[in-house]
Every structure is written in C-alpha cells, then in structure tokens.
Image (cartoon, rainbow, N blue to C red):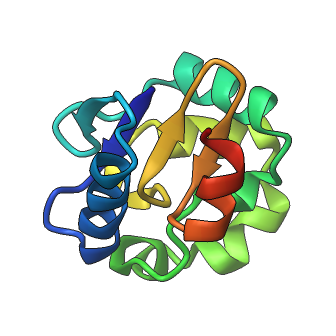
Amino acid sequence: MLFICYPKCSTCKKAKKWLDEHNVEYTERHIVENNPTYDELKEWFNKSGLPIKRFFNTSGLLYKEMKLKDKLPTMSEDEQLQLLATNGMLMKRPLIVGENIVLTGFKENEWSEAIK
C-alpha cells in the first residue's frame, strides 16, 4: 500500500495510527515533498471509481484562494488532474493506494471495509 499524507495533518495522523494498529504494511509518501504526478493521478482516478472532486481538498486554503469551487465545474477531468499534479496541498488527504483500492480522506468504516 502507498500511504500519501501530509505529516502535520491531524486526519493523516489518525489514518497512520489506524494503519499501524491494524498491521497494514505501507510506504509513506509526503504529499508536498513528493506530489503525485499527472500520470499517477490519472491512474488512481480511473482505478478509484470516485468523482474527481473527491481528490480535491475542498476545505484547504489553497483551494479557496484559487476559487476552485467556481472554476472546477468548467474544467475537464484532464485539466483538473493536471491542476492537482501542480501542488500536493490541493489534494484530499490522506490518500491510500493499493492494488485494487484508492481511498481519499480517512473514514475509518470505509477503510475497514476496503483494507482487509
């Protein structure tokens, strides 16, 4: 599993603790220092089955500063993926990527079902 997080984020800390408590093996990746690439994002988005908006940190400062709430509806999925690849702070975190799963954000019940 690939665990993409922002170490200072309280939700990411909770998710990491959950992974450790459930003995899930993972590789940790800092979302700002090693931002996902366009190609990675495209693959994960396609694998996830989630709407593209679930990949955005809609409560983040950068999202609000860039007024993305108004801009995203007029952008193609490809343009949105390219935008996400520019800055890790735009992304919903944490992100967990496994062979058959991609989850954004940390919802314990969702993770419990998907990660066994």
Image point (25%, 76%), residue name: 10
Image point (50%, 41%), residue name: 96
User: Viewer-proximal residue, 19 or 58?
Assistant: 19
Q: Is residue 96 left or right of residue 13?
A: right
Residue 63 drawn above or below residue 77: below
User: Viewer-proximal residue, 31 or 15?
Assistant: 15
Image point (54%, 21%), residue name: 40
Could you say where residue 3 lies in the image, as x and y percent from the top left?
37, 38
Residue 55 drawn above or below residue 84: below
Q: Is residue 74 left or right of residue 19?
A: right
Image point (82%, 66%), residue name: 73
Q: Quadrant of the C terminus?
A: top right
Could you say where residue 48 lies in the image, as x and y percent from the top left?
76, 37
Q: Quadrant of the N terminus?
A: top left
Residue 112: quarter of image: bottom right
Residue 79 drawn above or below residue 65: above
Could you say where residue 35 lies in the image, as x and y percent from the top left?
32, 35
Could you say where residue 37 lies in the image, as x and y percent from the top left?
45, 24
